[in-house]
Image (cartoon, grey):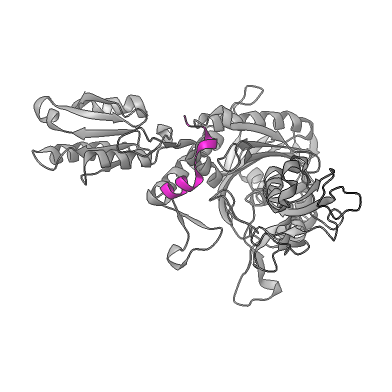
Amino acid sequence: MVDVAEKSMEELVSLCKRRGFVYPASEIYGGINGFWDYGPLGVALKNAVRDDWWRNMVECPPVGPDGDVLQVVGLDSSIIQNPKTWEASGHVGGFNDPMVDCTESKKRYRADHAWVVGFHGGEEDADSNSSSGVVPEHFYAVVADSKETAIEAAKSEMPKKFAKRVADATAVTAFDQTNLAPDWPRLSPATQTATLTEPRMFNLMFETYVGAIRDEDAKAYLRPETAQGIFLNYKNILDTMRVKVPFGIAQVGKAFRNEVTPRNFIFRSREFEQMEMEWFCHPDDALKWYDFWKHERMRWWKSLGIDEGNLIFRDHDEDELAHYSSACVDVEYRYPFTAPGYGELEGIAHRGCYDLSKHTEHSKQKLEFFDQTNNEKFVPHVIEPASGLTRGVLVLLCEAFTPTPERKGSKYVMNFPARLAPIKVGVFPLVNKDGMPEKANALYMKLREKYVCQYDVKQSIGKRYARMDEAGTPYCVTVDGETNENGNVTIRHRDTAEQEQVHIDRVEEFLGEKLG
């Protein structure tokens, strides 16, 4: 498999557009930043990931540490909730990002992606204006995704005579009044000049209005996460379903965040889908369940065929934790745009009893659990495995994307696991004569009842194979001259491009063994 660091995001994005995985939203009007449409293959891939998650989380949940099958039920809550929901959750008052504006280009950037870069010359220089002949310190504020990128950007702006000493550059993470001296240049990525404003806070929730009158009383919000709908329905689930603590509520759905700087294709967008589960448990057992779900979620990502070397755990530092969280770990993936580093894929958070307690306080509804066995009342603690469905799609696209310059006809192959591939089988007649189309179409009509198939008669067989390779189709079945002579068809394997002869009556059996 090709090292993910060597894969080109530009080439992947181009393939996604060309083969119908992902399109820019509203493209005929010039698009809209931070929004994407999933084409025929993209929505099939997304649904395959969603269904596998739902199957493994809700329909066939894992066995817990005590050997019992876990209780997890599903939910689909409303995108728009009573606005008091977001006051109780803290989103109205605290769901903010610091931002800076470029006064020249009018572009906006997240301030927490800015770095203060300090370069200390420290050596004598005949051209220095310093009376001591020592090169003075130079400081730059740079907007960048990483310390390394910030340092490189600052190096490019430093006087060329300092080039032999640029290795002394250092960076710190804070772009605020206390850390940024007034005489340090604030470099804008758009202008490469000191045109950035001081930071100010920017709420990430999309506002809307419910009803005919647009005033403060009618204001509502598109949900920035799916979790709160689960907490609002916690008591409904207890009252209507035969569940008891510990148990989980799972949900897949759209969420919306007015990101200041959407970027890296579908990695950070303003409309996305989440797969979240809230696990309600006794406070004394919370750490046990936190550890369980941490490893269970990593196991599931690996089950999708993701290379283990591209996945890591990263524990949050204390200053990263949400105010209500006592522990949080991310499952991170090595994306092409983060390599050799990693970026977030899923977070597993110990949320404590914060959410249920806050909703109890604001709604005046008791959200305790009564354990009849132990005659005990308590507010459950919550462990939350929360992942981005659309980010999971990006991981599978990055993982599958394989340049194949050595292969005739196919410049790229999408090596999806067969069970997740949007199209499972391609069925072709070699040529449009000699009864081949009729035999191929009859085979297609039979196979389509069990597998997602594509019947294709256009262009050369090589070009049809290439299209299927880029779509990620594991097997192609071709009716050719051999079929008329002895009943054999040619089955081509996507990953190796090898071909084998199988009797037409055994094709369904062959695919059953390979695809299940």
Which of the 4 image quarters holds residue 178?
Answer: bottom right
Left/right placement of residue 216 relative to residue 308 reads: right
- SS assignment for the magenta stretch, majority: helix
Q: Position of residue 222 (x, y in %)?
A: 62, 61
Residue 89 vs 404, above or below: the answer is: below
Which of the 4 image quarters holds residue 216?
Answer: bottom right
**Measuring 21% from the left and 47% from the top, which residue is drawn there?**
458
Residue 380 falls within the magenta-colored stretch: no
Observer-nearest of 169 and 390:
169
Residue 80 visible in the snapshot: yes
**Measuring 82% from the left and 56% from the top, which residue is drawn there?**
176
Observer-nearest of 140 and 113:
140
Q: Position of residue 290 (x, y in %)?
A: 71, 32
Residue 449 visible in the snapshot: no
Q: Quadrant of the C terminus?
A: top left
For the view shown, which residue lies furthest in the top direction? 67
**Measuring 21% from the left and 34% from the top, which residue is drawn there?**
478
Left/right placement of residue 111 relative to residue 80 reads: right
| Part of the protein shown in magenta | 1-16
For the view shown, which residue lies furthest in the front direction? 126
Observer-nearest of 476 and 190:
190
Q: Position of residue 154 (x, y in %)?
A: 72, 50
Residue 14 falls within the magenta-colored stretch: yes
Q: How many marks?
A: 0
Q: Position of residue 256 (x, y in %)?
A: 60, 57
**Measuring 80% from the left and 54% from the top, which residue is drawn there?**
361
Which of the 4 image quarters holds residue 5?
Answer: top right
For the view shown, which residue lies furthest in the right direction? 132
For the view shown, which residue lies furthest in the bottom direction? 213
